[in-house]
Amino acid sequence: MLYAMELFAAGYPIVMAHLWMIGALLFLYKWERRLPRMYDREFVYPPVSILLPCHNEGDTVRETIAWLLKQDYPCFDIIAINDGSRDETGAILDELAATDPKLRVIHLAKNQGKATGLRMGALLSEHEYLICIDGDALLEPDACRWMVAHFVSSPRVGAVTGNPRIRNRSTLIGKIQVGEFSCIIGMIKRAQRIYGYIFSVSGVIVAFRKQALHDVQFWSTDMMTEDVDITWKLQRNRWNIRYEPRAKCWVLMPETLKGLWRQRLRWAQGGMEVLSKNIGLLFHWSGRHMWLLLIEAILSVAWVYTLALLALVFMVQLLIGTASTVSVSEVVFISAALTVTCLMQFLCGFFLDSRYEKNIWKHYFWMVWYPIIYWMLGAATAFVGLPKALLNRKRGLATWVSPDRGLKS
């Protein structure tokens, strides 16, 4: 039994890393290598509404809206939703709206959460296609064109997730996240697109078809991670979700361990909530198209708890003096194998994303720290997030707090 657990703990991340690499390279071969670098200006682009939910974004919202107004898109408007901000966000939005007719502002009296803000903006929008970004993000001028083209090409596309890039890179944590978003998040989205279904759109940059949102009754207001939940709701109803690597959005991320812990714990708890909400699909033939995604999610949780149990057994063996030299050497060998696999994955991811960001290779050296910091952090947050999700069954509005946005570079 112990040997089987050790085999699973060592083999699962290695197998999954190779599956992600193979899938991402297939994505490159099937779609990405033929993607044009410039969009067709003769193409008829339908009008869009850009939804910008804001909560205490006074430090960043001016810059965010300035970038939105630079969109190279024929017809768009911006709907900013001030979700009960306690700082000057509301006043800044009103000031900006008075100077540009493209911007409309909705004020919510109290913090009701990002999902509520997005739902309100979607219901008040005039257009069929919605671009949703965070209040501290900078959207590249051509991003809307790249995403909307997918909706025009197929009536069954319900959402298109973009390519978030890290803005702040002044610390080790920030530098590592450059690689994480390229080689973990971007690579997995490519591979999942090939294999059929995506675990989550990127909430910081995603486009939706309003008809699809209406079909699934919009965002759930009680879920910790509304982006994961809406992804599963759309795919349960057979809407396609695509990944568009050319639709770039520059984001701020935590650069302290405390801020990173809070963010990743929220992600882990939200993912567990969505998993527990959808696990019943395993027992219904009508949900078979979601089985592969569910099984992968369940295995990832099982891996975390297997790892925790093996770590406990190993520590006990060390304390009572029964840990053999073979056991220690096995741990060293497995750790080395995981590190090499991780660096291979980063090599593949940097190769794929070097098309979209110049000088990305200079961050490759820092990726050697990723398994030490992020795998341990990810395992710990998943370990804590599962019981939090299961115990939090009576959920109210999933409100938000201002995140740690690190230091701008």
Image (cartoon, rainbow, N blue to C red):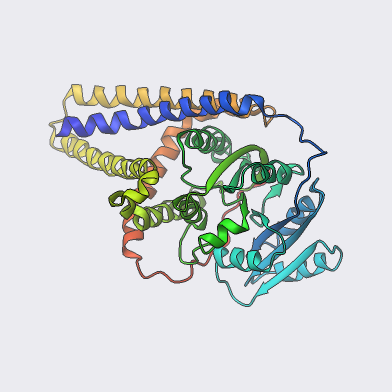
162 lies left or right of 193: right
332 lies left or right of 221: left
Instruction: Give the x, y percent position of residue 245.
Output: 63, 36
Extreme-bottom residue of the structure: 109
Instruction: Give the x, y percent position of residue 365.
Output: 55, 25
Q: Is residue 6 above or below residue 62?
A: above
Front residue of 179 and 194: 194
Image quadrant holding the N terminus, namely: top left
388 lies left or right of 63: left
The answer to which quarter of the image holds residue 302 is: top left
Q: Is residue 73 above or below residue 81?
A: above
Image point (82%, 39%), residue name: 42
Instruction: Give the x, y percent position of residue 3.
Output: 17, 30
Image quadrant holding the C terminus, namely: top right
The answer to which quarter of the image holds residue 120 is: bottom right
Image point (85%, 62%), residue name: 100
Is residue 88 visible in the rendered image? The answer is no
